[in-house]
Amino acid sequence: MTASDPYSQDAPSDLQSPPPATAGDLQAAADHDPEDPLRKALAEAAEMKDAWMRARAETDNVRRQAQADVAKAYKYAIEKFAGDLLAVKDALEQTLVAKASVSAETLRAGAELTLKSLAAAFARAGISEIDPVGQKFDPHSHQAMQAVESDQAPNTVVTVFQKGYLINDRVLRPALVTVARARESGSGVDTDTDTDTDERPA
């Protein structure tokens, strides 16, 4: 093989292979072709990331708002009930500062009006009385203090020592009651007079 042979190993070495394409070259090439799958995939990925970030931010905002609402509701849950009780407190204070010349009947009438105001406040708050005289004993809302013999059916509430209260459907305080029990048929003592039937010797 001669030195002038173009296919000789001594051929010029300035002909080198091109460098490998970089990610930027691929992106630039993809930008030139709108229909390039790579470009479409990158665009869709960017849109999905943006949508996910927005959804996450919205979820965080809703969670923080819900937490704030719960905290506010817990803190001011009795605000309306407390406002209703202010009128009752005002009436009681007026009674205490009443002049000595005020008659007992007037004071009683004022106390009855105050009690009515309190009952109305209870009703608006969902608080109701448990006054079970004549009703069947209910261990869920009644507390028996004693049982007494009575003509009423056994386990019937005979007397209420202290009223109970419900708040909506939950027992706030059970009623303290006396319940009936059946009368005993006898005292258990034989009242017949014993007769000595043995004949005594004459």
Image (spheres, helix red, strand yellow):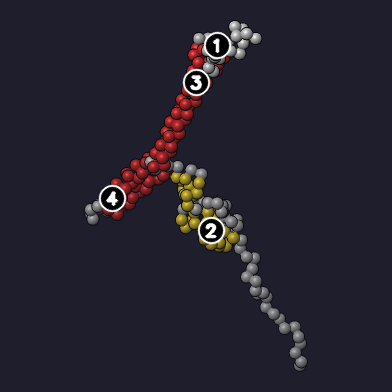
Residue 28 horizontal/vertical position (percent): 49, 14
Task: Give the distance between the C-alpha atoms of the residues marked 1 and 3, in whole angstroms.
Answer: 48 Å
Q: Nearer the viewer, residue 143 or 5?
A: 5
Q: Position of residue 189 (x, y in %)?
A: 65, 74
- Of labels 3 and 4, the one closer to you: 3
Q: Quadrant of residue 195?
A: bottom right
**Mark 3: few, some, or many residues within 10 Å (few <14, many ≥20)?**
few
Residue ID for mark 3: 46
What label does residue 93 carry, if any?
4
Question: What is the C-alpha distance between the residues marked 1 and 4?
Answer: 115 Å
Figure check: 87 above or below 32: below
Q: Amino acid at mark 3?
A: Ala
Mark 2 vs mark 3: in front: 3
Q: Residue at x 31, y 48 (%)?
A: 89
* 7, above or below 120, in the image: above
Using the rendered image of the protein, determine whether residue 27 is visible from the camera's viewpoint: no
- Marks 2/1: CA distance? 115 Å
Q: From the image, tell me which residue sits under label 1.
A: 12
SS state under label 4: helix
The amino acid type found where label 1 is placed reads Pro
Foreground mark, 1 or 3, reads 1
If the image is split into quadrants, where does the N terminus sit? top right
Q: Which residue is mark 2?
A: 144
Q: In this orientation, which residue lies closer to the viewer: 156 or 71? A: 71
In the structure shown, which secondary structural element does the residue marked by tag 2 occupy?
strand
